[in-house]
Image: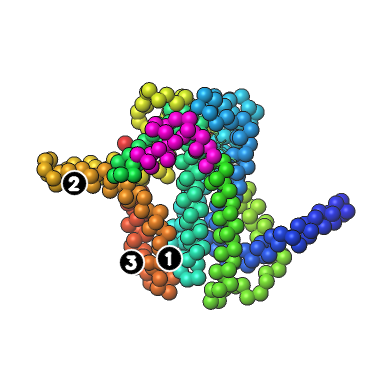
Amino acid sequence: MFARSEAALGVARWIEARAGFGGLARALAGTARGRAWWLGAAALVAFVVQIATGALLLVHYTPTPERAFASAQAILWDVPFGWLIRLVHAQGASALLAIGITHTVLAAVRADYKQPRELVWVCGRILALLGFAAALTGYILPWSQLSYWATTIATSPLEKIPFAGATLVALARGSETVSGATLSRAFVAHVIALPLVGIGLFALYGRLLARARRLEPGGRFASQPSSGLVRDRALEVAMIATVYLAIVLVLAIFVPHIAFPLHADRPADPLNTPNPIRPEWYFLWASELQRSIPEWIAILPLKHGPLATVAGWVGELLPLAVIASAPLALLSIPFVDRGPERDPRRRPIAMLVIVVTLAVLAALTVRGSHT
Ligand code: HEM
């Protein structure tokens, strides 16, 4: 037993001397441990669980229009414990995004984007947006009626963009309509490109966070944290992983239908549009915005003439402009709000913007879930 642990320690020292992971682990262990730390660690755990379950799904999944639905169904019904892996992956997507959204809101309230943390914020938000992209591309893979029509609905607003519309749609779908080319693109993005970029960004996030703590006035990082602290943090992350897995397993076992809503159990049929097609909760605000703005504009007493034409354009393009500018607005926050104050009680305008944004998003989500 003793010899084995000595050997393991030797291997760990050998790797450490060449890779220097321990330096980063010590740097991260030295960062302050508040609510944001717990949420960040939970996001990392959720990401690792997605990679592990995704890799297992890959063993039986086939990314072709002829086989995708049947292979995803076989994972659910025929492969031993396939149902559990698929459900944990599908519910894990929701959990990962819920953690990412909460982390973003908390960081915004605490102004965790102010100097010297601007790049920490930018990197963290790109990671959160990457989670949305992963969920979007993953949704296509089971090639169900829901996959097919949700993808058609999500990509068709691009057609309305003047001049570039047709090119953008062709880029997103790989063809004029959603097809095998769309499935191939989604598959490569989902299982290769996005996970690789995600791993790189998580590593960069760790480095940036550790460096920002060192630069911060009063940062608890003057001296190298001890290896005991690293062990304590590792135990805490293991605890977070246990709680996270317990929650996702409970969701997978007791409320599996959340992950597989209406039309998810039928194969894609391009000739038959099912009704209603409702996106996942994290995209409801965007689909509701696209429905509501033209409705509100139609109320205006503009039925004929050039003004009515302009109003028609605004109705079609405004929702797209809002959705496209949301990520940019999020990333630009550190460069707009540059004052030194971090206390939420002394930043009334920032708090007002956060509360109004959340209220609008919540109202659109609730409305979207009832239509
Ligand atoms: C941030 C990480 C990820 C998120 C948010 C995510 C999300 C999703 C979602 C929502 C689905 C559809 C689930 C369903 O309806 O069954 C899915 C399917 C799938 N994902 Fe992921 N995924 C992630 C990472 C990965 C990775 C890293 C891999 C592979 C290494 C992977 C492989 C798959 C496969 C093969 C499917 C199709 C089988 C199925 O539908 O169950 N995923 N993913």
Residue appearing at x 78%, y 60% in the figure: 13
Q: Is residue 325 magenta?
A: no
Residue 146 can be seen, yes or no = no
Q: Which residue is mark 2?
A: 310
160 left or right of 229? left
Mark 1 and mark 2 lie on one chain; the one further toward the N terminus is 2
Q: Of the residues shown, which amino acid type is indicated by label 2?
A: Val
Mark 3 and mark 1 lie on one chain; the one further toward the N terminus is 1
Residue appearing at x 55%, y 69% in the figure: 212
Q: Is residue 169 magenta?
A: yes
Disc 2 is placed on an element classified as: helix
Kindly give the residue lying farthest to the right in the view shown: 3
Image height of 39 relative to 52, above or below? below
**Residue 58: quadrant of the picture:** top right
Please tell me whether the stretch drawn in magenta is mainly helix, strand or loop.
Answer: helix
Mark 2 and mark 3 lie on one chain; the one further toward the N terminus is 2
| Mark pair 1, 2: CA separation | 35 Å
| Label 2 CA crowd tier, 10 Å (few <14, some 14–19, many 20+) | few
- Dividing the image into four quarters, tell me where ligand 1 lies: top right
| Label 1 CA crowd tier, 10 Å (few <14, some 14–19, many 20+) | many
| Highlighted range, magenta | 166-189
Q: Which mark is residue 349?
A: 3
Task: Indicate the colouring scheme.
Answer: rainbow
Q: Of the residues shown, which amino acid type is indicated by label 3?
A: Ile
75 left or right of 369? right
Residue 139 can be seen, yes or no = yes
Q: Which mark is residue 17?
A: none
Q: Which mark is residue 334?
A: 1
